Image (cartoon, rainbow, N blue to C red):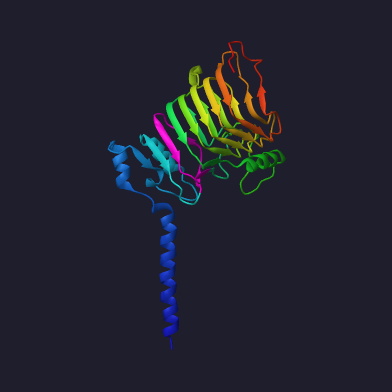
Amino acid sequence: MFRPFRTRVILFVVIATICTSMVCAGTANFSNPTAVEKILSGSRETAKASWWGFDEEDSTEFLQAAINSGAHKVVIPNLSKPWIVRPIQLKGDQELVLEEGVVVEAKRGEFRERGDSLFTAKDIDNLTIRGYGATLKMQKEDYMVGDVLHRLGWNRWFGQYEKAEWRMALRIRGCKNVQVLGLTLSDSGGDGIYIADGKDGKISENIAIRDVVCDNNYRQGISIIGVKNLLVEDSVFKNTWGTPPSAGVDIEPDGEDDVVQGVVFRNCRFEDNYGDGIEVALRNLKGEVSI
C-alpha cells in the first residue's frame, strides 16, 4: 500500500537532482580548464570567454579573465542568454569578437560611479572590437529614474543613482589603432561611444568605426573630445535623448590642448535625435582643426 508513495519520493529525488545539475550547468558547463591553460601558456591564440565560465547573473570575472589572458583573439560566444557584467576593462594587441546575437549587458544595480562605463579602452594600442549582430546594452532608464529617486531621497530595488552623463557604452581614451565594427551600442547613461585623450594627454589616434548603430543613448550617440585620424562610416546614430545636447554626434573638445584632426564621417545617418544630428562646438580649441 505504500509503494505509490515510495515511487513518488524516488521520482521527486531524481527530478530534483536533474534540476540541480541544470542550475549548476549555468555557471560551470561551459568552462574548459585545459583550453584556458593552453591560452595562458601561449600555445593557443584564440580563446572563448566561456572557457573561464558563464554565470547568467554576473559573468564579469569570466569575461575579464578572458580579456586579461593575453589571447590574441577573444570570442564572446552566443549562449542564448545575455552576458551580464559590471564595468569591463579592455586590453591592447587583441581582437574581441562578439558572436552574432550576443548581448553584453550592464548589470542592474551596478555602475554606481558617475563615470562607470560598460567597456573602457584606456591608453592601449591595437584593439579590434568586432560584433556584427551583437549589442552592448546598458540600463539608461535605471540611471534616469535612480537620479530622480536620489534627489527625492526615495529608493527602489535597483537603488538610487547620482546624476551623471558619463556612463558610456564604450569609452576610448588615449588609444591608438582601434577598430569598432558592426556593434549596436544602446541605452547608455552617457554616450554610445566616447573618444578623448588618455593619461598625460596621450592622443587617441587612428580610430575606425564601421557599421555601428548607436541607439537610445542618454547624452550623445558619439562624443569626440579629441582624436587624430578618425574614420566613421556606414553607421547610424539615432534616438538620443535624456540630457543636452542629445545629439547624434557631438565634436566638442574640453580644452585648448585637445586635438581634432582628420575626422571623417562617411555615409552615416543621424535619425530622430532630440538634439542636433551633428553638433560641432570648438570654442575651447585653439589648435588646427580638420573635419
Camera-side residue of 49 and 87? 49
Whether 265 is drawn above or below 118: the answer is above
Q: Position of residue 291 (x, y in %)?
A: 59, 18
- Identify which residue is drawn at 66% across, 37% down: 239
Camera-side residue of 194 and 77? 77
Q: Quadrant of the N terminus?
A: bottom left
- Identify which residue is drawn at 62% across, 49% down: 157
267 inside magenta stretch: no
Whether residue 114 appears in this view of the structure is no
Extreme bottom residue here? Answer: 1
Q: Which residues are magenta?
A: 82-104
Extreme front residue here? Answer: 267
Whether residue 178 appears in this view of the structure is yes
Q: Position of residue 105 (x, y in %)?
A: 53, 43
Q: Quadrant of residue 49?
A: top left
86 inside magenta stretch: yes
Camera-side residue of 183 and 63? 183
Q: Position of residue 231 (x, y in %)?
A: 53, 24
Whether 29 is drawn above or below 126: the answer is below
Q: Position of residue 180 (x, y in %)?
A: 50, 32
All told, the count of numbered labels is 0
- Identify which residue is drawn at 47% across, 29% down: 179
- Identify which residue is drawn at 65% across, 42% down: 141
Q: Is residue 128 left or right of residue 109?
A: left
Q: Is residue 111 left or right of residue 283?
A: left
